[in-house]
Amino acid sequence: MHRAAKAALSTLTLLSLATLTACGGDSGTDADSAAGKPDTTETAAKQPSPAEYLAKTMVTTSEVKGLKVDEMDEEFLFAKSPDELTTDKPLCAPLALAMNQLPLGDPRADLTRSVSGQIESERKTGIGYTYITLTSYASGGAASALADVKKAVEGCGGGFTAKSKESESPYDSVTAEKVTPAGDEALGFKSTLTVRDVQHTVHTEVVRSGDTLAVYFSVDGMAIANARPSDAKLSPTVVKAQNAKLA
């Protein structure tokens, strides 16, 4: 990540943003009956773990030409785990998690990447950094987590405050946004926050594909660092490419 971008994200943070056993019989009958059947141990061994699946599914730089996909730098995280984040309104916790690149609900694995740069065709839309958080769940977990986000969007319109061990981030408002249909279900919302008397708008989209969630979040860290208003939109290129890999 470029030094200027790091500095911006650092300022952003300081300003409150930001898992077979097999049993076999000894008798010849059991052995004979097993002949010709698939080796379940071998089959299980070929199945990727939740973490491996997410790593394979995450978009890469070559899939979003003109942009760069990077690993997250823990130095600039608002909180390193959901346990480190609290909200003054419990209902709003899913929103704080989504906007701070933290997994929702009860995940089996999660992975986050940041995407930087701009494509000329998107330059006028005020696109900043787009963050992607992919999370894998046991059956039903992704749908439940998304339902919690929906309830939060509906009930937290007046804003809320998120807190971590060292930072505090007040969000002034939350508003639902229309998004392009994707996956099994999707929703979007925007939130406003005021930093040094300057208002900024950030955008979030959550897409469920089976038992996987993709959370997209955009913010213009340089604008916040330089005290100029911002309204950073999600990169359509990034969202489209990632949704295609989840389909």
Image (cartoon, rainbow, N blue to C red):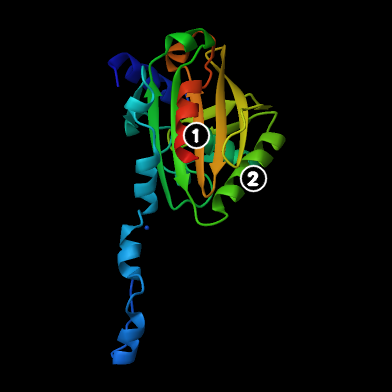
Task: Name the image quarter holding residue 134.
Answer: top left
| Number of residues whose C-alpha sits closer than 10 Å to that of mark 2, classed few (under 14), some (14–19) or many (20 or more) | some
Q: From the viewer's perspective, is residue 81 above or below residue 222?
A: below
Residue 17 visible here: no
Q: Which residue, given by chain and number where applicable, does mark 1 sit on?
A: 243
Identify the residue at horizontal 61%, vertical 30% (top origin): 188
Query: Viewer-proximal residue, 49 or 148?
Result: 49
Relative to 183, residue 15 above or below: above
Query: Which amino acid is tagged 1?
Result: Asn
- Residue contact between numbered discs 2 and 1, judged by CB atoms under 8 Å: no
Identify which residue is drawn at 39% across, 44% down: 54
In which quadrant is the N terminus drawn? top left
Q: Give the secondary structure at mark 2.
A: helix
Looking at the image, residue 36 sits to the left or right of residue 226; the answer is left
Residue type indicated by callout 2: Ala
Residue 19: x and y in percent read: 37, 58
Instruction: Identify the mark at residue 147; answer none if there is no mark.
Output: 2
Q: Quadrant of residue 245?
A: top left
Q: Earlier in the sequence, mark 2 or mark 1?
A: 2
Q: Residue at coordinates 36% horizontally, 57% vertically from top-left?
A: 47
Mark 2 and mark 1: Cα distance apart in space:
19 Å
Q: Is residue 131 above or below residue 11?
A: below
Residue drawn 30% across the image and 65% down it: 42
Residue 228 spot, x, y in % from top left: 50, 7
Going by the image, does 191 lie left or right of 74? right
Residue 166 lies in what quarter of the image? top left
- Which residue ends up furthest to the front in the rendered image? 36
**With respect to residue 230, does 207 lie above or below?**
below
